Amino acid sequence: MDLSDLIEVSAIMPALKANSKKQVLQLLAEKAAATTGLPEREIFDTILQRERLGSTGVGNGIAIPHGKLQGIKNITGVFARLETPVAFDALDDQPVDLIFLLLAPEGAGADHLKALSRIARVLRDTETTEKIRGTQDANAIHTFLAEAPASNAA
C-alpha cells in the first residue's frame, strides 16, 4: 500500500498554524470535509471520540489520528505539518508537528489497519520526517510520503 493512494496533494497542509490539539483536529476535520464531502462535524466528532480512548500521538513529534465513518467511500488521508508543535498527550510527552489523519469506511477492517501500519512505518523513518520538516511545499511533502522506504511494506 502506497501512501500516495491515500492522500492527494490538495489534502496536505504544509504550514498549518494551530495553538492546541483540539484546534489541530478541527482544522484537519475541515480539510477532510472539503476532500471527502462529508460533514465536518461528523469527522471531528469521530476523531475526537477516538482521541478520548487514548492519544494518537505516537512519539517523535508524530500523531496519526484516525477513525471510521459511514458514507466515506475510500480510505482517505489528510496531512499537516505544523508551524509550531502542539501538546498532543503523545506517548513520549513530546509536542507534535507532523499529523496524518486517516479516515476509513466502517467496513474497511484489515485495509484500515494496513494503512495505519504503512503510515506509521513511513513516519518512523527519520530521513523522511527530516525532509518533511524541512519544506513548506505540499507537492514535495506528497513526494516524500510516497517515496519513503518501503521496508516491511504491507
Image: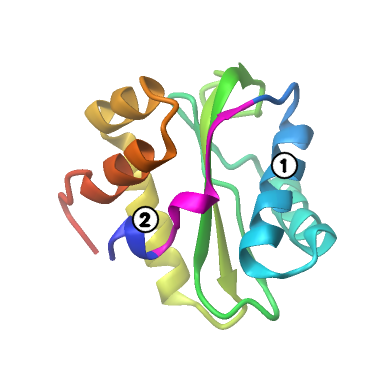
User: Residue 103, percent across and down?
Assistant: 58, 63
The picture places residue 89, in percent across and down from the top left corner, at 65, 28
Task: Indicate yes or no whether the magenta region holds residue 14.
Answer: yes
Residue 142 lies in the magenta stretch: no
Q: Check the image and report above or below for 72 versus 64.
A: below
As rendered, which of 129 and 108 lies closer to the eye? 129
Q: Quadrant of the N terminus?
A: bottom left
Residue placed at 65% from the left, 21% from the top? 86
Q: Look at the image and give the residue range highlighted in magenta.
A: 6-16
Q: From the image, tell me which residue sits under label 1.
A: 27
Of label 1 and label 2, which has the lower sequence position?
1
In the image, which disc is placed on residue 154? Answer: none
Considering the image in quadrants, where does the C terminus appear?
A: bottom left
Marks 1/2: CA distance?
24 Å
Residue drawn 65% across and 57% down? 32
Answer left or right for 89 relative to 152: right
Q: Nearer the viewer, mark 1 or mark 2?
A: 1
